[in-house]
Image (spheres, grey):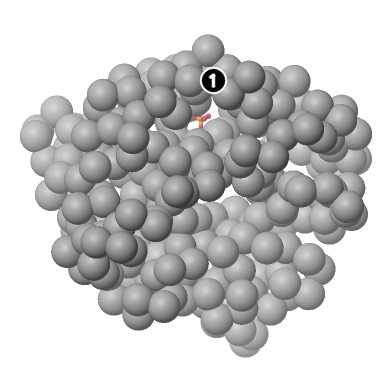
Amino acid sequence: MRTPVIAGNWKMFKTPAQTREFFSAFLPLVEGSSHCEIVVCPSYLSLAAAVEAVAGSRVRVGAQNIAWAKEGAFTGEVSGPMLVDIGVQAAIVGHSERRQHCGETDATVLQRTQAALEAGLQPIVCVGEMLEEREGGRTEEVLRAQFQDGLAPLTPEQFGSVVIAYEPVWAIGTGKTATPEIAQDAHAFLRSLIAAAFGESAAQATRILYGGSVKPDNVQGLMAQPDIDGALVGGASLEAGSFAKLVNYDG
Ligand code: PGA
């Protein structure tokens, strides 16, 4: 049995004051929800406010990125030990927006994932194909390459702490969710890659989240798929009511 994860990726939205406001509305709405893990990933600037706001609740706070080094001359980067020090517990790695706009590659995804694991953070590693790759029938080829270069080099023990997010780039922020069937196919394919690299029991234990225009009205169809273990949510995680509805997808 894989415990589902509902994670919010706030991207470059919300100040610390808006973060506190969100949690005072959100926490009472998810107080009774114990069926899934809840993670919220604000910008670096709002992490401390988020950690403080969720104290005593089941909600965990994640960063949206993490440096591959522990410390050093890396202007603009924030390291795993720094994140852990303030109470952060997870980090998104390799989001497609970072791959597209910030030069993230499978090699840096692997390094950042290793840095997260060394620091004791749970990496949420994003993979997914672009529209032209899907239309060109190359989805599996792209996922295989991202997995082989970004995840397969981890040790089995390291891999055991990883959560994967399948996010087809054409579905992110576009309102075009993958149909549950399209998402399920990609998740099943990723699980087969995990089985080949790390064995069947690792494949059965790994949580694979779907991301890309997940909303309260489509979450149930996605969550009903056998290989979809949760969601990584952008836009619909910004408002307390809609994110609470996503967390409470089963009721
Ligand atoms: P979206 O973003 O839900 O706004 O499509 C998802 C993501 O980028 O993680």
Residue beneath the point at 56% across and 64% down = 122
Residue 190 x/y as whole percent:
25, 50
Residue 156 located left or right of residue 88: left
Residue 142 located left or right of residue 179: left
Which residue corresponds to mark 1?
A: 215
Q: Amino acid at mark 1?
A: Lys
Q: Secondary structure at mark 1?
A: loop
Q: Residue lying farthest top?
A: 217
In-front residue for pair 134/159? 159
Residue beneath the point at 9% across and 33% down = 136
Residue 204 x/y as whole percent:
33, 54
Residue beneath the point at 49% across and 22% down = 219
Residue 235 located left or right of residue 44: left
Q: Residue lying farthest left?
A: 137
Residue 109 x/y as whole percent:
40, 65
Q: Residues within 10 Å of mark 1 (few under 14, many from 20)?
A: many
Residue 23 x/y as whole percent:
84, 37
Q: Is residue 220 above or below residue 68?
A: above
In-front residue for pair 103/174? 174
Residue 104 located left or right of residue 45: left
Using the rendered image of the protein, determine whether residue 25 is visible from the camera's viewpoint: yes
Which quadrant of the structure image shows residue 182? Answer: top left
Using the rendered image of the protein, determine whether residue 18 is visible from the camera's viewpoint: no
Q: Is residue 177 above or below residue 4?
A: above
Q: Is mark 1 within 8 Å of ligand 1?
A: yes
Residue beneath the point at 17% across and 64% down = 196
